Amino acid sequence: MMNIQPIHTDDDLERAFLRLEELWQADDGTPEADELEVLSILIEHYEDQRYPIGSSDPVEAIRFRMEQRGLSPRDLEPLIGPSGRVSEVLNRKRSLSLRMIRRLHDGLDIPYESLMADTTA
């Protein structure tokens, strides 16, 4: 029998994670699998309420990908334009154009949603 409790605190969250680990390999169709599903939903709800993730920032998305791939601002020139333009974009003095967004998406696999976050607000 499930003994599921609401998650109100980080301590409750920790207990839910511990139980989730115990249930992780539950077979489909079992009470344990049902408990795993309910716990997952409760954890996700608590985390969404307690630790909301804000909209992506295009410059942060670019910087993140640069760090992942060990790129320098000079490596962005084929995608954004001359070094001055790259600098303006990275220093938030110039917005991304649609052409830059397409090139960054195609060249660095940055999701369109991340690159267009400031233009959709």
Image (cartoon, rainbow, N blue to C red):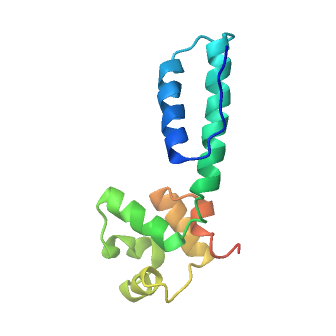
Query: Is 48 above or below relative to 17?
Result: below
Residue 107 position in % (x across, y down): 46, 60
Can you say whether 25 is above or below 73 in the image?
Answer: above
Q: Is residue 55 left or right of residue 88?
A: right
Q: In which quadrant of the rendered image does the C terminus lie? A: bottom right
Q: Is residue 31 left or right of residue 57?
A: right
Which of 59 and 40 lies nearest the eye of the viewer?
40
- The residue located at (57%, 58%) in the rendering is 111
Q: Where residue 95 sits: x, y (%)? A: 56, 83
Q: Is residue 54 above or below residue 18?
A: below
Percent across and percent down for residue 42 are 65, 38
Residue 85 found in image quarter: bottom left
Q: Nearer the viewer, residue 45 or 92?
A: 45
**Which residue is at 45% across, 59% downward?**
108
Q: Which quadrant, please, contains the N terminus?
A: top right
Q: Is residue 66 left or right of residue 81?
A: left
Q: Position of residue 96 (x, y in %)?
A: 56, 78
Please give the name of the residue rendered at 48% of the width and 20% of the height, measured from the top-left corner.
Answer: 22
The residue drawn where x is 59% and y is 64% is: 54
| Count of picture labels | 0
